[in-house]
Image: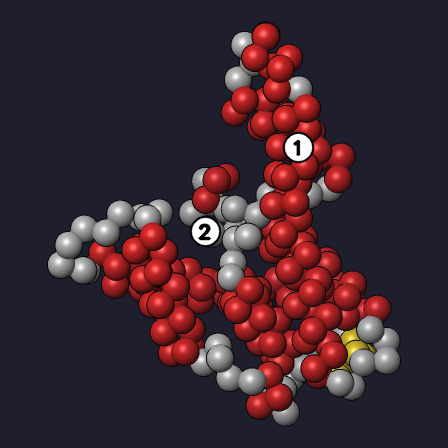
């Protein structure tokens, strides 16, 4: 998945807390945060699930692909493209589309629709103080800022690893261990480990 579960939890808490300042009125903050986190996780994991579906499909036709000399990579892209269209899955990675950011603008927009619908459906816990689309546009603004913060964390972590006295190859076990360690440190600096209850009052 594009972001760690810890960061998704942080974004969920922050988004609800910031929306609660003006855009929404909350009943039970904990329930709302959990529903938002669940909705965001499912949307961000949609492409991963689709990738698994494509792999399973291609495995069934592995023999035919070998006989015809079909490229696995090209077949994967073609099948994935078709399934994304059929299932309405929006690509998550912005860098793959040349946008420069980790997450695509289209994915942020899709998330805004998913989250505003989640909030609107929580009638016992949430009251929208503005028109639904106005709240959705604010969600886009909030998510864009929060995901930008994560990119700063990623850059800081990579800088720390690259500043080591010896070369550590990205993708290796040592890189992964250091990345998780430094990422956790940067999350603490951001205040992302504070409990939700203290952020929603």
For the residue pair 40 and 144, the one nearer the viewer reads as: 40
Residue at 31% from the left image edge and 55% from the top image edge: 175
Asked whether the residues under the numbered discs 2 and 1 touch, taking CB atoms below 8 Å apart as contact, a structural biologist would say no
Residue 167 visible in the shown view: yes
- Check the picture and name the quadrant holding the C terminus: bottom right
**Marks 2 and 1, the one that precedes in the sequence:** 1
| Res 48 quadrant in image | top right
Which circle marks residue 56 in the picture?
Answer: 1
For the residue pair 141 and 199, the one nearer the viewer reads as: 199
Q: Is residue 117 left or right of residue 196?
A: right
Q: Position of residue 47 (x, y in %)?
A: 62, 45
| Res 149 quadrant in image | bottom left
Q: Position of residue 128 (x, y in %)?
A: 78, 76
Q: Position of residue 190 (x, y in %)?
A: 42, 77
Position of residue 15 relative to residue 163, above or below, is: below
Alpha carbons under labels 2 and 1: distance apart: 30 Å
Q: Residue farthest to the top? A: 68
Secondary-structure class at tag 2 = loop
- Other-residue count near label 1 (Cα within 10 Å), few / some / many at <14 / 14–19 / ≥20: few
Task: Quickly name the residue at label 2.
Answer: 101
């Amino acid at each position: 998945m594009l972001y760690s579960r810890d960061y998704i939890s942080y974004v969920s808490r922050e988004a609800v807390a910031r929306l609660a300042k003006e855009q929404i009125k909350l009943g039970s903050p904990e329930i709302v945060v959990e529903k938002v986190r669940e909705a965001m996780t499912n949307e961000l994991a949609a492409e991963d699930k689709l990738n698994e579906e494509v792999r399973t499909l291609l495995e069934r036709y592995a023999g035919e692909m070998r006989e015809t000399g079909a490229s696995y990579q090209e077949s994967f892209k073609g099948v994935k493209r078709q399934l994304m269209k059929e299932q309405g899955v929006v690509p998550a990675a912005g860098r793959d589309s040349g946008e420069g950011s980790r997450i695509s603008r289209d994915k942020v927009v899709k998330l805004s629709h998913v989250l505003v619908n989640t909030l609107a459906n929580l009638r016992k816990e949430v009251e929208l103080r503005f028109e639904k689309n106005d709240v959705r546009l604010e969600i886009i603004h909030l998510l864009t800022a929060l995901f930008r913060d994560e990119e700063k964390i990623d850059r800081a972590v990579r800088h720390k690893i690259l500043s080591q006295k010896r070369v550590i190859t990205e993708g290796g076990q040592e890189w992964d261990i250091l990345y998780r360690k430094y990422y956790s440190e940067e999350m603490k600096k951001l205040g992302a480990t504070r409990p939700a209850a203290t952020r929603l009052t």
